[in-house]
Amino acid sequence: MNNLGLNFTDLTGLSFSELKDAVVRLNLPYFRAKQIWSWIWRHGLTDFQDMSNISKPIRSLLTKRFIISRPSISRRLKSKDGTIKWLLRLSDGQEVETVYIPEKDRGTICVSSQVGCTLTCSFCHTGTQRLVRNLTVAEICGQILLAMDEIGDWPAGKLNRRLTNIVLMGMGEPLFNYDNVAKAMKIVMSGEGIAISKRRITLSTSGVIPELIRCGEELGVNLAISLHAVNDTLRNQLVPINKKYNLKALVDTVRNYPNLSNSRRVTWEYVMLDGVNDSQEDAKALVKMISGIPSKINLIPFNPWPGSPYKTSRSNNINRFAAIVLKAGYASPIRTPRGDDILAACGQLRSDSVKKRARERESKYEGKSP
Ligand code: SAH
Ligand code: SF4
């Protein structure tokens, strides 16, 4: 609440047309909305007092009604190879992970869409976390804004920008938070703001078919499918949402995803689990299953976490698998681990932090007991 007894509106959660309405409600002209939008999304400002083309009285008015938020940083881990992983704290104390991965000709941010995940894929650490909520639009955009602050990438859209690609591959199932994810992506696509095109955004999903269809029709971003198994029995175990949306339905839906072509392929993510899904037969069944769909296959060595029931495939099995896929004509990069020295399995940083705080609470309590 502010001193007028009104709630502050966080502008990082508003589309341009919502910002325009909010500005017009303050009896300010339309062009002020354009200026504010540019300061927030092109220049990364968080303080209205820095908006130099807006008069002081109007800046004060804006300060009384609006905020431009950022998540706060709980932990920041920087790898030798430049990868940065942040554990971010949200306004209710919940935490999510965000990662920035620099490469020679691009820089990718891996964004979370939920605190935890309601799905329980058996190899995924995030899926073991019970407390789950959807991230707001401001919290999804906030991860990108904060990363740009941290890597010094303002103004957006400059030559040689450092953040060029977005992958929705962090904590959570983005299609279970479709409305907020879609609105956030439309905001960061805006040509007057961060201006990252849909061709540079990839959404990863375990296969929530109704929203997958909406995503193709309304958002048109690139698609990555967490496949991990080529028969329903195994996929039911690894990716339990398969019991609701089985492999045939999933592959048929992907086949109809709009505008697929050789220059715009679907990525099939396949986590390599020792003795579980890494045989030559699996590789052959995989290429047969996706035949005719413009595809890339991303083989991901399993990233173990404390108590995980699987082991990473042996490297000769991964190579054998990759060779079969390659022979069938599909690019099959084996995801080389980045930020090896800092990147625990996705979700582990948050779990460790939750445990640490619980221990701190306990020891405080013990200290007070008679
Ligand atoms: N919920 C979405 C996006 C987040 S998971 C999805 O499932 O696609 C992002 C990717 O990381 C998925 O392909 C997921 O299967 C993979 N993944 C999860 N845990 C992993 C682990 N321990 N090792 C390797 N990859 C993992
Ligand atoms: Fe959720 Fe994706 Fe992890 Fe499955 S792999 S539990 S859908 S975050």
Image (cartoon, rainbow, N blue to C red):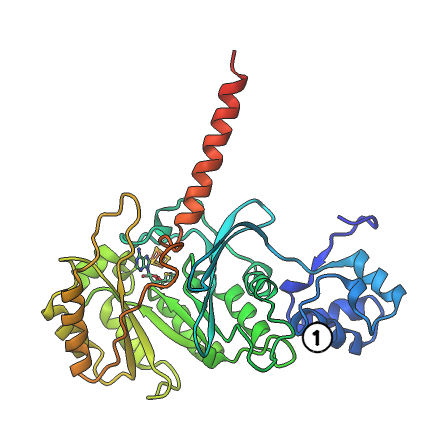
Count of marks placed on residues: 1
Of helix, strand and loop, which one carries label 1? helix
Q: Residue at x 56, y 69 (%)?
A: 183
Estimate the x, y position of residue 76 in percent, counting from the top left.
51, 53
Estimate the x, y position of residue 139 in percent, counting from the top left.
57, 58
Estimate the x, y position of residue 159 in percent, counting from the top left.
58, 82
Q: Residue at x 23, y 68 (%)?
A: 247
Q: Looking at the image, which residue sits at the far front?
A: 80
Instruction: Locate residue 207 relative to residue 157 in the image: left or right.
Output: left
Q: Residue at x 56, y 68 (%)?
A: 184
For disc 1, the marked residue is: 38
Asked if residue 112 can be seen in this view, the reply is no
Instruction: Locate residue 44 relative to residue 176 in the image: left or right.
Output: right
Instruction: Locate residue 230 relative to residue 56 in the image: left or right.
Output: left
Residue 70 vertical position relative to residue 164 in the rendered view, above or below: above
- Residue 268 found in image quarter: bottom left
Residue 300 vertical position relative to residue 95 in the rendered view, above or below: below
Instruction: Locate residue 276 relative to residue 257 in the image: left or right.
Output: left
Q: Looking at the image, which residue sits at the far right?
A: 57
Q: Which kind of residue does numbered mark 1 sit on?
A: Ser
- Residue 40 found in image quarter: bottom right
Along the line of sight, which residue is nearer the eye, 43 or 209? 43
Asked if residue 76 can be seen in this view, the reply is yes
Q: Ligand 2 is found in which quarter of the picture?
A: bottom left
